[in-house]
Image (spheres, coloured by chain):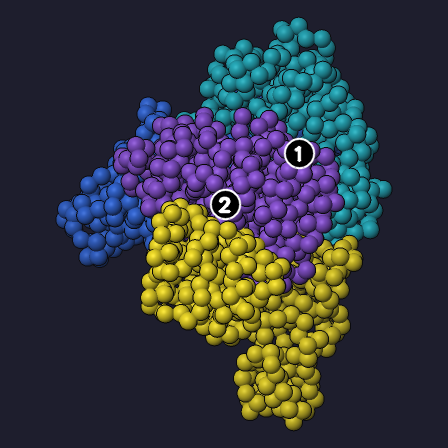
Chain colours: A cyan, B purple, C yellow, D blue
Amino acid sequence: MSVFIDKKTRVLVQGITGGEGRYWTKHMIDLGTQVVAGVTPGKAGQDVEGVTVYNTVQQAVTATQADASVLFVPPRFAHDAVFEALDAGIRKIVVTAEGMPLHEAMEIRSAARLLGATVMGGNTTGVITPGVAMMGFLPYWIDRVYRPGRVGVMTRSGSLTNEATAMMVKAGYGVSSLLGIGGDAIPLTRFAELLPAFEADPETDAVLIIGELGGSMEEEVAEAIEAGLFTKPLVAFIAGRNAPEGKKMGHAGAIVSGGKGSVAGKAKALRAAGALVADRPSEIGALFDQLGLPQ
Amino acid sequence: MSVFIDKKTRVLVQGITGGEGRYWTKHMIDLGTQVVAGVTPGKAGQDVEGVTVYNTVQQAVTATQADASVLFVPPRFAHDAVFEALDAGIRKIVVTAEGMPLHEAMEIRSAARLLGATVMGGNTTGVITPGVAMMGFLPYWIDRVYRPGRVGVMTRSGSLTNEATAMMVKAGYGVSSLLGIGGDAIPLTRFAELLPAFEADPETDAVLIIGELGGSMEEEVAEAIEAGLFTKPLVAFIAGRNAPEGKKMGHAGAIVSGGKGSVAGKAKALRAAGALVADRPSEIGALFDQLGLPQ
Amino acid sequence: MKLFEYQAKGLFAEAGIAVPAGQVVDNVDAVEAAIGEVGLPCVLKAQVLRGGRGKAGLIQFATSVDAARTKAEQLLASDHNVQKLLVEESLKIEKELYLAITVDPLTGKALVMGASEGGVDIEDLAVNAPEKIVRQLVDIKQGILPFQLRNVMFGLGLKGETFKEGMQLLKALFGLFSRKDAELVEINPLVVTADGQLIAADGKFSIDDSAAFRQKGLARTREQFDSDIEFEAAEAGFPYLQFDGDIGLMCAGAGLTNTVYDLIADYGGTVANYLEFGGPNYRRAVEAMAFTLRSKPKVILVVTFGTIARADVMAEGLAEAIETLKPDVPIVTAIRGTNEEEATEILKGLGLEPLNDTEAAVQKAIALCG
Amino acid sequence: MKLFEYQAKGLFAEAGIAVPAGQVVDNVDAVEAAIGEVGLPCVLKAQVLRGGRGKAGLIQFATSVDAARTKAEQLLASDHNVQKLLVEESLKIEKELYLAITVDPLTGKALVMGASEGGVDIEDLAVNAPEKIVRQLVDIKQGILPFQLRNVMFGLGLKGETFKEGMQLLKALFGLFSRKDAELVEINPLVVTADGQLIAADGKFSIDDSAAFRQKGLARTREQFDSDIEFEAAEAGFPYLQFDGDIGLMCAGAGLTNTVYDLIADYGGTVANYLEFGGPNYRRAVEAMAFTLRSKPKVILVVTFGTIARADVMAEGLAEAIETLKPDVPIVTAIRGTNEEEATEILKGLGLEPLNDTEAAVQKAIALCG
């Protein structure tokens, strides 16, 4: 069992004929992901890395029974592409685009909730079950960054994720499944909503959350633990302890404003709920050791 | 047990201070319906038949835990009133207004489906479980028209419903629960969607459908029977056998156009599925006799 | 409310959808000037609301001014109630498509339908070759999204510039559908010209009557009705249909009305007119009976089984109507519902013999027609 | 992008929301003419984007032209980067309300918030008396419905004509929120005047940067930035912040950047600037380094752990930047990710000592600052 994606997931790539789409389709396939179709309007009949391209998601789904989609489309077209996937019945979607307009993200979040769909992103590096399958662009082939293991990871970051998983590998731990929810101001799926999947996953012994200043997602995780909805050990690293108020370093979600979303508040809530919080990435491994987790 | 409404249902009346709202609130209460609140914007604090009036549905629900709402508001305001009820968490709504704009009905139907709400109408005379409770304006106190019994009724009509139930009473049968889905072109709930409730209701032995020309709701019922989703005996009367094509006698739903929605087609589908179809209201009683139904 | 072709095309043009060059004329003398605008050969299209105009001879081609005048004269004089003609340029047709937007009662969404075989009857196509119809549901609140436009245009088999033009056209058409509270907008055929342009060669447009209050730009006119009386009744707020039989029908509710109509037919009677006496009209008996009498019935049959409508109020109204209008035809009633006992007394006081059984009332009315 | 008060009020006025009579001035001599328009007493409001202007002395009242000139002079000369003043009429205030629309990330809906105690800090109210805040979620696709307007207006305790005016105002404000891709619109205080009028006495308006492509009417201007370099970097597409420390930071990704910033602080270093070197900017090393050098850093620290960004491309870019710009400060790198071995070789070829540990890189950079 794995979380979100496994060998049976029939993956569609929207925007497959673009540079990034091509490049990462190859890597997804190399890992063993079952990429069954691609979509680029007007490019039907082309072939990318052995994958057939269709004009519309509807056609791709009809032809291939694709049941998950990863989007390599520019942010302005992400809204349309997500609704195209939803309309065709796809309920697992990964949005890599950074900088989708906020109101469009709202529409997606609202629609996905009503439809029971899980949309990861925007601005996510994707999801991966190392050794099994990937939707996105994580450099899984770099041994010192990714290796299969028993720690589930949820993250708001891209490069920091690699930093943190590299620290895990260094300390002897690997990843069961990693879900990037992305760095946008309105993540289309929130940390707490993913906890049940990790709770149910027999291949996950503990979860690492890579959080950031801003928003309230880390606090929601603390609430879920307090409510008994998640019972496995949880370790967190949250970036931005010293970030100046009102200054945005990087993407939209990572900002403290109106006194809300500070790392201190998040760490306090998580610790109160029984989670372990690392002050820097290099401490993550030691915290897993402290849990007595099998490596 | 009853269908849609029972003694425990906490009924709100939107538009309670209007003439019809007042008049039928009294009748609903007289039957034993638990009317807990009324809403008319700007009339908070008034009292109608002993029922407190609130400015907003939100306030009414907070104060009284109302969980169902019947609307006595004009058709132009029905859309707003339905969304107000949905927004306040109410999931059972009866819309009596005739002539709600079609596009607004579409919005309601679409939203109700996503929310799992049941909205009856527009243009319905309401729902009743004789002897128990009512939301709407059925003249239940006329003995020869309504009496409690074991036949569930679903209807698209108002006055024809009374005609048909009077025929049932004449033949010795009574009503378990009656659900008026209304005569609009886009009924907010469709016949087939209500079959499971009647199937599950131990107080319902058989169902009478009072249909009309136009639309495809009777055909959907036939499909549900064929699919084994409804197994109790079913009798139907469908008005409009001789109606000229393209002519609208009465409300928007009752028209045959493009060769679709003819009574002949509906009757044929229902008979093929094993239902009994009356050619006129006076035959309804005999068909129940034929079923050997207890009176 | 159904719009005439020329009105539909007027809305299309405003929304940026290409339509053939055309002029509306209501007399033969205006035809020549119209041809001056649209050129020859031209098409003369009778502006009537019925379908199947081609087969009924209501669309004519002309290659000369004289021929056009003659044909226009014939069309205007036909027995199809033709008040106006649309004189249009003749198009160079490469291909005909079908495009329409309507409502899907099942999902509560707008339904876009397209077919690459236009000019045909879409209902026939739906039965005989449903796979040739592209369907796309659209959330009315959200409006049509680019992928939905693409789905339809790929389904129609368009390419290149025509594809892009098609996307714009459908977007504009959906905007119209939405803004105008349409029940149906249909372009059939949607013509692809030899140079790849898309032109709406015909147009159907039906506006939701229940939204008329916010669509004031599109007023009801006499032309939309087959008779003066139907137009006047509609203006007065009475749903009314004119037939050519014996029994004037004042009925409450679609279900009961259709049932009574069925029973009259079953028992060998005929209907002079139908007037909706229910809903808000139950308090307007005098006006209702006045309209009914204009259909020259041999008998008036009043059948109600009141819901909101109260039986006593209806009976009082009939008393006033009889007093005011002094109808010279017999009146048969079956008025039931709230306060029906009082109603019975009132009607008996008028010298009527009120019934409370629908079939008995129908049979009596037929008998009275002799 | 945050708008200045005068810009927000310009949008309010266009949408039919009443604002005080006011004029924008950028020099003392224009004050007298402005007072001619708005009358005396008047209010002088420094147009800056920071909050708490009242406490900071950036809002001043004047009862004479002379006093106004003096205060205007002081405001324009203050160290708050004040480029413009808004000179406004003084309102007759009966009551102050709070009204705002923002986004609710949890539901994906717009969130309308109101409070009958305006002029206060809504965050304080949310903590200390949350029951005083009316909240109404609104579906962004559907727009705000009448009942939602009523819910808010009843919550604000309005009555009669002021209630109706409030409904119109909120409807207009929601329209703006929606059309302008706003992150936040806020009227605080929303003044109820002695005669029951509603006037937006202050306005905050923040537009989603990601939607700037379709909000071209609201161009970014120099005034919105604290420094020339931040403005120019933004124009060039580089997220950039100016600090006053030692280390020039070229980093990829918010998470990693904030981590590096934390580590620098933990180890006792300071930051000269932050420049986002990730996303599409990873191929623009020359420009990136040029901006970074303008912050006068003692050392440049480059930390990336590439996702889309490829390490070798970044390293090649740095090589070009060093060649082009010939920076006179040391460069510390921790460039990891796809093709990191090639990157390491390239950097070594430049005479650098590439690291692959973030903490080690931070410590080295701090050490080099001396």
- Residue A282, above or below D291: above
- Residue B24, above or below B256: above
| Viewer-proximal residue among B150 and A32 | B150
- The quarter of the picture where residue D115 lies is top left
Residue visible at 38% across and 56% down? C347
Identity, as a three-letter code, of the amino acid under mark 2:
Asn
- Residue D295, above or below C288: above
| Image coords of residue A85 (percent x, y) | 68, 42
Of all chains, the one bearing label 2 is B
Q: How many marks?
A: 2
Of all chains, the one bearing label 1 is B
Label 1 Cα crowd, 10 Å radius (few <14 / some 14-19 / many 20+) = few
| Viewer-proximal residue among A220 and A173 | A220
| Viewer-proximal residue among B221 and B106 | B221
Determine which residue is flagged by label 1. B292
Numbered disc in front, either 1 or 2? 1
- Residue C369 seen in the current view: yes
Residue visible at 66% across and 64% down? C165
| Viewer-proximal residue among A3 and D155 | D155
Determine which residue is flagged by label 2. B162
| Image coords of residue A128 (percent x, y) | 72, 27
Q: Given the current orientation, which residue lies at the most extreme right position?
A: A50
- The quarter of the picture where residue A284 lies is top right
Label 2 Cα crowd, 10 Å radius (few <14 / some 14-19 / many 20+) = many
Task: Tell me if label 1 and label 2 are in contact, CB under 8 Å.
Answer: no
Identity, as a three-letter code, of the amino acid under mark 1:
Gly
- Residue D228 seen in the current view: no
Query: Between marks 1 and 2, how big is the CA–CA gap?
Result: 23 Å
Residue visible at 51% across and 62% down? C365
